[in-house]
Image (tube, rainbow, N blue to C red):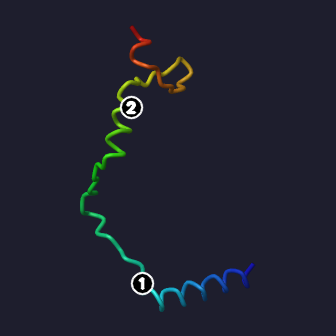
Amino acid sequence: MAHVLSGFMNLTERLRFIFGPAARLDTDSPVVHKHDAFEQASDEELSHFEVETDSHGHHYAVRREDLK
């Protein structure tokens, strides 16, 4: 097990040397979420569903037109 871990650490050290250190993001900055056409189409499809919860706490989706 120690040999595997040592090999992995050597590999990551070589990759860091080649590609540079991992980029670290500022954790205090807000997440920028961009909506593209695919996501807008997905949101449109999901807008036809309502999330329901049964007596056991299970969540499921129901078409809004079926709730009428």
Q: Which mark is residue 53?
A: none
Q: Quick one: quadrant of the C terminus?
A: top left
Mark 2 or mark 1, which is nearer the start of the sequence? 1
Query: Which residue is at a point 51% across and 25% down the rendered structure image?
Result: 60
Eyeballing the image, is 24 above or below 55?
below
- State the residue position of label 2: 45
* Residue 28 horizontal/vertical position (percent): 26, 63
Q: Quadrant of residue 47?
A: top left
* Residue 38 horizontal/vertical position (percent): 36, 46
* Residue 41 horizontal/vertical position (percent): 35, 39
- Characterize the local packing of mark 1: few (<14), some (14-19) or many (20 or more) Cα atoms within 10 angstroms: few
Eyeballing the image, is 3 above or below 63?
below
Q: CA distance from mark 1 to mark 2?
A: 41 Å
Eyeballing the image, is 7 above or below 34?
below
Query: Which residue is at a point 52% across and 19% down the rendered structure image?
Result: 54
Q: Residue type at mark 1?
A: Pro
- State the residue position of label 1: 21
Q: Nearer the viewer, residue 46 or 30?
A: 46
SS under mark 2: helix
Q: Residue furthest top?
A: 68
Q: Quadrant of residue 66?
A: top left
Q: Residue type at mark 2?
A: Glu
* Residue 20 horizontal/vertical position (percent): 42, 87
Give left or right: position of 45 versus 5. left
* Foreground disc of the pair 1, 2: 2
SS under mark 1: loop
- Characterize the local packing of mark 2: few (<14), some (14-19) or many (20 or more) Cα atoms within 10 angstroms: few
